Amino acid sequence: MPSDAKGLGVEPGQEVVSDLRIDPRACTYVKHEVVEVCFAPSPGTVLSREGLNRYREGDAVLTGSTGDRWSVSRERFDARYQALTGTPPGADGPYVSQPIPVLARQMAHDFTIARSAGGDLLRGLANDWLLQYAPGDYGVVENARFARVYRRADPQPGVDPREAVPARAWRACD
């Protein structure tokens, strides 16, 4: 049964957790993927598997290695992706995701969540993954795609992972 943005698809009687930093079922993952990028010449929308993505002029419209399409604000894109050799930064072409840790939780039931406060509404199916990039900043990734492009983050020797991932809880999974 679909839930609202606060319910996150939990069963009746379960604790409702809308912040993965304090959810004991969430773990830290990193993404590795080469994507094709076009920078939007004007505002528009792209329909992803998870829902409608609105974008503004200059935002990035990405096509992932699995054929999925979505949009990312220019500010977030510049912080999370690097142009591959031969592509000038800011130009259309191939980019690679940076190994930035995110919190993720595989959901047991269908769910719905706002991408951000007042943002696009995303939908996930049972076994899809809810991602939290920062407080109030969410994504949804289909289970098979998640398995292809995300890996558990391993702490670096000698580095306190809580310091390496500011404002987020580091949680390795068993």
Image: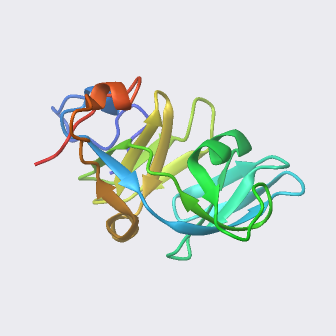
How many marks the image carries: the answer is 0
Residue 68: x and y in percent read 55, 70
Q: Residue extending furthest front?
A: 158
**90 vs 85, nearest the viewer:** 85
* Image height of 14 relative to 77, above or below: above
Name the side, left or right, on which 72 lies relative to 31. Answer: right
Instruction: Tell me the residue at 56%/76% (across/down).
Output: 67
For residue 28, what is the image quadrant?
Answer: top left
What residue lies at 26% left-to-right and 41% top-to-bottom?
Answer: 156
Question: Which residue is situated farthest in the right direction here?
Answer: 42
Above or below for 79 versus 63:
above
Residue 8 sits in which quadrant? top left
Give the residue drawn at x 34%, y 25%.
Answer: 163
Residue visible at 67% across and 45% down?
78
Residue 102 seen in the figure: yes
Colour scheme of the rendered structure: rainbow
Is residue 17 in sight in this rendering? no
* Residue 32 % position (x, y): 44, 62
Foreground residue among 106 and 120: 106
In x, y percent, where is residue 132? 42, 39
What percent of the width, then of the height, locates residue 10? 25, 40
Q: Is residue 90 left or right of residue 147?
A: right
